Each structure stands twice: as structure tokens, then as C-alpha cells.
Image (cartoon, rainbow, N blue to C red):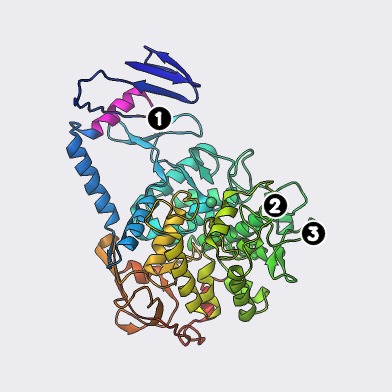
Amino acid sequence: FTAVALDNAIKTNQTEIEGNHAGSIIGFSTHKGEQIHARVASSFISFEQAELNLQELGDGDFDRLTEEGKNRWNEILSKIEIEDNDIDNLRTFYSCLYRSVLFPRAFYEINAEGETIHYSPYNGQVLPGYLFTDTGFWDTFRSLFPLLNLIYPSMNEKMQEGLVNAYKESGFLPEWASPGHRDCMVGNNSASVVADAYIKGLQGYDIELLWEALKHGANNHLKGTASGRVAFEAYNRLGYVPNNIGVGQNVARTLEYAYDDWCIMRLAQQLNRPQEEIDLYRERSKNYRFVFDKENNLMRGKNEDGTFQSPFSPYKWGDAFTEGNSWHYTWSVFHDVQGLIDLMGGKENFVSMLDSVFVVPPIYDDSYYGQCIHEIKEMQIMNMGNYAHGNQPIQHMIYLYNYAGQPWKAQYWLREVMDKLYTPYPDGYCGDEDNGQTSAWYIFSALGFYPVCPGQPEYVLGAPLFQKVTLNLPNNKVFVIDARNNNDKNLYIDSAKLNGKKFTRNYLTHDEISSGGELSLKMNAKPNMKRGVRPEDFPYSYSVYKP
Ligand code: CA
């Protein structure tokens, strides 16, 4: 029995159909207990290519294939080995790692000559080389791509080649490939995805062309999509996207463009571009200051004439922000946290604003959306004030305590979030997964460090969840995080050694991890308030590449 379906109408005895939302139904007449093995393959290119893809299954023996699948997953997941006696935490960790590596998805196929080819959603042609899809950079620049760069760099090298191809075929890098260019979310965070990969040593693709793509995307916009920069003219003219020119989410856009400009500046330095180009993007990277309101110590919408948007409520979701409010977006200065501390009037004020996020009530103003969107509900259910971990903008915030000399508060809140918002049960997930980003946050946090600012080859310390972790890195390098007396009470770092030597910094460099070694931590039930407080322990020169 075969049938095809188009737009909900089922037609029997047909085997081919064309159109949107098409499907097929296949039935077999069987005896009781009889087993059917169906071998199915698909292709974005042709029926002939689908037949070729079918050969990947070999003889199609079901048991052998499930065994091979299991082995392949074990190979991928065992890049990180955990030793700990809390089985629930292990289940949560490996479930998160599994979800992290599902995206982006391969969109390429292998032809009869063994060459890598892909159907281009950009120009409709079948062309050589890699292409990947199903990733929104607004989400995944934060820690999903940094996770690939640390643990699975050879995969991201293929993805970077896919970006080269996307630019060749469409003139833009996709901000939300699904596949092709989509009008979804804000920012120009392809700059982060490209810069972080190159700065962390990935190679084998045309970085010069990607550099051209970043410059082009920063100063153009592909109509009807989120690719390039919406309102780039206003941003380049004023330094911010104004609130009153009919472009929504203007503070979110401004903050992300400023960070993206910093990423472009960093790549320009790496590629030895002319000083004027480096200076242009360094200057633009400071644009976050334009939407900072000193009166409230928060980010706030600004009109074209320089006045702030009024009235202002830090509890108002949407409007100047994207799926969040000012409490969530004020921290989106990944690249210049010291600059943000200065704007707030110093470390004390900065810490008090961080504390306030957890202390203010979980109230909200949803008038911009006209309904309570699920991200708001998730924040309320978590019951951590206005800390909204179920959506991406705030996910790096807890780590910022480190920049103001109070690392123990980061350690406390990170454990709270890991324990309460992630569990191995069906309701054990705190919001949108968003192509692996919310899972990648957990992976880094459970290891004990996090890429607060992708594009800077450094990871800010939290505190690990496990007694021992072994990272099996490329080139047979091994990095061990040993925290033997770690448990649900001993959640604070008391002292640390890196490769046997006393270690007082609150960050690790990418090289320190990727070249292999051992971080050993003595944990304690009480915070060590001396550690990470003295300037020499936590230098404010933290941002080595500060704009
Ligand atoms: Ca989200």
C-alpha cells in the first residue's frame, strides 16, 4: 500500500508528488509477528542521490546498524569522561552533551565520485563542498560554537567552510539558517562564530573570504531576512539603533552589533588588516555606552534625538529588547565588562545590580507582546527573581561576578542553576533548547568554566559539578579537572593548582586547556573570600584585548 499526501489531501496508489507540506504513507500486509525492515533514504538533490545515500546503510542489517550507531555515539560523547557518584548528574550531563552535538545539522551529501556536494538553498544549484543548517547564531554563538571549537574543532572547520559557501552563493552569511536566510532574531553574530573559530586555531577554510563576508554583513542588510544588519545606516551614523525609527528591539540590536564589531576588530588584528580598519571596529565596539542609562544603571531605549525612551520599566519585555527585558540585556557587553563596571560607577554598584537580578520580584510587563510569552512563564516558575535562564540573553550573567572580585557568588548561583533548572527527568529542562545552546551552557558550567566572551580565547571559572572530568582533546591532548572532595555541600573553590603550581586566576586560557594539563581544586562548603579578591589574583587587565 502506498499513498502520498499534499496539503492534507491523501491520494492512494501514487508514488510521486510535488509541493509544500508533502508526505507519504507506506503500509505492508503482514502476518502476526512478522518483521518488516524498511530501508529509507532521502536527498535534497535527486532520486539518484537518495539511492546513493541508501548505500551508507551497507547490507541494512538492523542489529548491526543499531550497534554501529551506539558505538558512534559513545565515541562522540566519550570526548568528555566524568567520574562521579551522582548518577542523576551524569544522566543530565550526557543528555545535554547529546543535545549539544545534534546541531547544526549536515546539509551536504556525497556523490558517486565520493565528492562532497550540497543543494544550495540560496541559488537552487547543486554545488561542491560542505553546507550545514538549523542553527540560530543569536543563540549558539554564546557557548555552543565555543564548545565545538574546544572539543570538536574539526567539525566546526567543515561548518566554517559551509559559511564560505553560503557567502559565495548568496552574498551574506546566514544568521538563522534553516536552511537559507530567515527573518528570525536579531544581531549580526556570525561575526562571533567566525572570529572565535579562527582565533582558537581552526583552519583549512578561506578565512580571507569570511573576513570580507563579515565586513559586508556589518554594513549591509539582506531585505526580508535577519542576515547582515537591520538598520545599519542608523547604527553607523548615530552609534545606536534608535527607538523611534520603526525598528523594534533596538537596544538588543545595538548591544549585539557593538559586541559583533569587537569580534570583527579581533579578527582584523589576527589577519593583520590595516590599522584604520582595526580602529574603526574598535571604536564601534564601544557603542554599547549609548544605550546605557546612568540614572537607572540599566540599558534603555534611546530616541533619534538622543533622549531616552519614556516611560521606562526594567520589567517590560520586548520593545527595545528581544524576548527579555532590561534586567536581562544590561549584561550584553561580553567584550568590555570593565567598561560596564565603570559605567555603573564601580565594582560595588555592579555587584549590587547583579545581586538585584535575583532579588527583584519575578514581575513582568507583557504589554508589548499582548500575551505572556513562554519565556516569561519560565522565568516565574524558576523563582529566582528576574533571572531568566530559560532564554539566552542572560546565560553568561552569573559569571560576571568574577570580574568584580566576588567569584564565590558565581559559584553559588551556578550550582543553584545546575541543580534546580536541569534534571534528568521529563520536566527537567528550563526553557528553549535553541539548537544546543541551553545544553552547551550546562556542559561548560558542569566542567567549571565558561566562554563569557567568544572571540577572546579565555574561559571564566565557575566551579565544577563533578569530582573528576577528563577532556579527550584533539592531537591526543588530555585536560583533567580534579575536584576530589566536590559534593553537594563543597561547592566553593578553596584553592587551585594548574599543572601542580598554585593558581589564583579566575580564568583559563584556551591554550592552557587545549595543550593538555590538570586543574586540581580543593573544594569547601564555605566560600574563600580571599581568593580572587586581591588585584594580583584577579587583574582587571582581564580583557587582554580590551577595546
Ligand atoms: Ca530562546
- Asked if the residue at tag 3 contacts the one at tag 1, i.e. Cβ–Cβ closer than 8 Å, the answer is no
Q: Mark 1 is on which residue type?
A: Phe
- Asked if the residue at tag 3 contacts the one at tag 2, i.e. Cβ–Cβ closer than 8 Å, the answer is no
CA gap, disc 2 to disc 3? 12 Å
Please rate how many residues cluster around mark 2, counting C-alpha atoms within 10 Å: few if below 14, some from 14 to 19, many from 20.
Answer: many
Residue 166 point in image, percent of width and height: 48, 41
Q: Mark 2 is on which residue type?
A: Asp
Q: Out of 104 and 318, give the one closest to the viewer.
A: 318
Q: Which of marks 2 and 3 is nearer the N terminus?
A: 3
Q: Earlier in the sequence, mark 1 or mark 3?
A: 1
CA gap, disc 1 to disc 2? 39 Å
Q: Label 3's element? A: loop
In the rendered structure, which segment of residues is drawn in magenta? 43-56
Q: Give the residue number, with chain letter if any, for mark 1.
A: 44
Q: Is 505 situated left or right of 174 in this image?
A: left
Rendered view: 351 above or below 241: below
Residue 200 point in image, percent of width and height: 41, 62
**Residue in view at x 53 percent, y 81 percent:** 405
Disc number for residue 310: 3
